[in-house]
Amino acid sequence: MPFEYDDQNIFAKILRGEIPNDTVLETEHSLAFRDIRPQAPIHVLVIPRGRYVSFDHFAQEASEAEIVDFVRAVGEVCRMAGVEADGFRLIANAGKHGVQDVPHLHVHILAGRSLGRMLSPA
Ligand code: AMP
């Protein structure tokens, strides 16, 4: 099934500079900014600049340069935020069951307190 990207999603608008964001890091292929509704003392989103809906889309179609840049950007934000010692969590929601609200790939970096177990029992 082909991936269909919606150019009107809110992160596309951020990338085009149509709405503001609280930038943490800019790289050639990626952008990191603070989540507008933080769920932990540190809550940063890292997105690729390219038109990718989800992690699986990115893994299939992004160039190696984009993938390296994105992974390094996640690591760099963790380093900048100083979260390596106490730990952090990465989340990339995808699709309906992943309850993805914004259909542009983003990795949540959450840290600054104990985050509890990964999921509650169903
Ligand atoms: P997800 O449910 O994984 O798609 O997460 C989307 C995230 O985007 C949520 O944590 C929102 O709080 C966040 N978000 C939505 N709009 C903005 C915005 N304009 N700036 C920063 N974060 C946003």
Image (cartoon, helix red, strand yellow):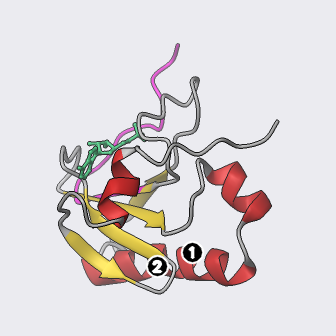
Residue closest to the eye, 30 or 122:
30
Mark 1 touches mark 2? (CB < 8 Å): yes
Residue for point 57% across, 38% down: 94
- Image location of residue 46, percent across then percent down: 41, 64
Q: Which residues are magenta?
A: 108-122
* Magenta span contains residue 121: yes
Residue for point 48% across, 86% down: 28
Residue for point 17% across, 62% down: 20
Q: Residues within 10 Å of mark 1 (few under 14, many from 20)?
A: some
Q: Number of labelled discs? A: 2
| Quarter, ligand 1 | top left
* Magenta span contains residue 5: no
Q: Amino acid at mark 2?
A: Ala
- 31 with respect to 99 (left or right): left
Residue for point 53% across, 82% down: 72
Position of the N terminus, as image quadrant, is: top right
Displayed quadrant of residue 97: top right
Q: CA distance from mark 1 to mark 2?
A: 5 Å
Q: Which residue is mark 2?
A: 73
Displayed quadrant of residue 111: bottom left
- 5 with respect to 9 (left or right): right
Label 2: element kind: helix
- Image location of residue 102, percent across then percent down: 42, 40
Q: Which residue is mark 1?
A: 71
Label 1: element kind: helix
Residue closest to the eye, 33 or 86:
33
Residue closest to the eye, 31 or 50:
50
Residue closest to the eye, 117 or 98:
98
Q: Residues within 10 Å of mark 2 (few under 14, many from 20)?
A: many
> Magenta part mainly helix, strand or loop?
loop
Label 1 C-beta lies within 8 Å of the nearest ligand 1 atom: no
Q: Vertical placement of 82 versus 4: above or below?
A: below
